[in-house]
Image (cartoon, grey):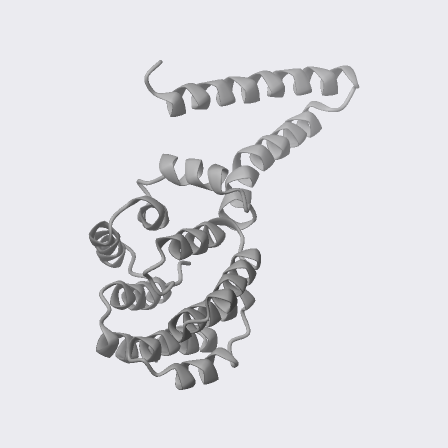
């Protein structure tokens, strides 16, 4: 156990939760609160702590270290493994992770988005054009189509699609790629900051990690 810090922290966290639950139960019972109400209160507090923290990390946090620790611990989930791989693994490993997602997650939205992601990482322009029209929202369609156009060097058409995107982190991520390809490093840095500032949770982590890779057009994770 001493060689597994995640296990040690996990055991300590559960002991703390158990001890806290016992103390809270005793306090509520001494306050003459009915037992059924005590049970409900303790369960609500317990679920808020055990479920609320992961939800915050996945959707609300901007703390890269906390998100990284969460992803490291939960890499058995292929969607989290993809986010982790972007920060830590090679392009080949990222592609393998996406292929695993496509094999194991059959939901239509995940299939559409990650198939497009795969085309981005493989720099397959033809596939990206073909796949982008089947994406679930107009923002997705415009984002991925614009990325395909950038791969072809068609900056003007990509810029026209960028103006139609409403989701702010996506809009600025695309503009960052446009600015980089146009050779405007100042605008690129500004758009990177704007994009990452509008994203939270795992999406924030993915964007920061993608921009740090320098040589990739940022795909989307959901």
The structure residue drawn at horizontal position 41% and vertical position 57%, both measured from the top left corner, is 211
Would you say 187 lies left or right of 181 here?
right
Q: Position of residue 74 (x, y in %)?
A: 37, 38
Report the residue at 73% width, 17% height from top.
27
Q: Is residue 190 left or right of residue 207?
A: right
Which residue is found at the position 48% from the left and 78% from the top?
A: 162
Q: How many marks?
A: 0
* Residue 110 point in image, percent of width and height: 35, 62
**Which picture quadrant has residue 142?**
bottom left
Report the front residue among 78 and 67.
Answer: 67
Farthest-out residue, right:
31
Asked which quadrant contains residue 37, the reply is: top right
**Position above or below: 169 against 138:** above
**How far across and down, in percent of the image, does residue 66 sit?**
49, 37
In the rendered view of the protein, which quadrant contains the C terminus? bottom left
Tell me: residue 119, above or below residue 152: above
> Which image quarter holds the N terminus?
top left
- Examine the image and state in which quarter residue 111 appears: bottom left
Q: Position of residue 152 (x, y in %)?
A: 28, 80
């Amino acid at each position: 156990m001493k060689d597994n810090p995640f296990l040690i922290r996990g055991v300590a966290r559960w002991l703390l939760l158990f001890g806290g639950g016992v103390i809270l139960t005793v306090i509520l019972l001494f306050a003459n609160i009915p037992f059924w109400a005590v049970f409900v209160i303790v369960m609500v507090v317990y679920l808020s702590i055990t479920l609320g923290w992961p939800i915050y990390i996945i959707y609300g946090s901007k703390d890269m270290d906390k998100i990284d620790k969460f992803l490291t611990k939960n890499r058995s989930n292929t969607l989290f493994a993809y986010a982790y791989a972007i920060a830590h693994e090679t392009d080949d490993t990222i592609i393998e992770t996406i292929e695993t997602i496509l094999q194991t997650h059959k939901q239509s939205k995940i299939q559409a988005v990650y198939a497009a992601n795969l085309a981005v990482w493989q720099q397959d322009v033809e596939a990206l054009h073909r796949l982008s029209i089947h994406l679930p929202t107009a923002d997705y369609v415009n984002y991925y189509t614009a990325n395909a156009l950038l791969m072809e060097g068609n900056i003007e058409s990509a810029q026209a699609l960028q103006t139609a995107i409403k989701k702010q982190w996506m809009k600025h991520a695309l503009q960052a790629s446009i600015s980089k390809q146009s050779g405007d490093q100042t605008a690129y840095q500004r758009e990177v900051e704007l994009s990452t500032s509008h994203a939270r949770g795992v999406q924030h982590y993915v964007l920061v990690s993608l921009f740090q890779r320098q040589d990739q057009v940022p795909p989307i994770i959901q």
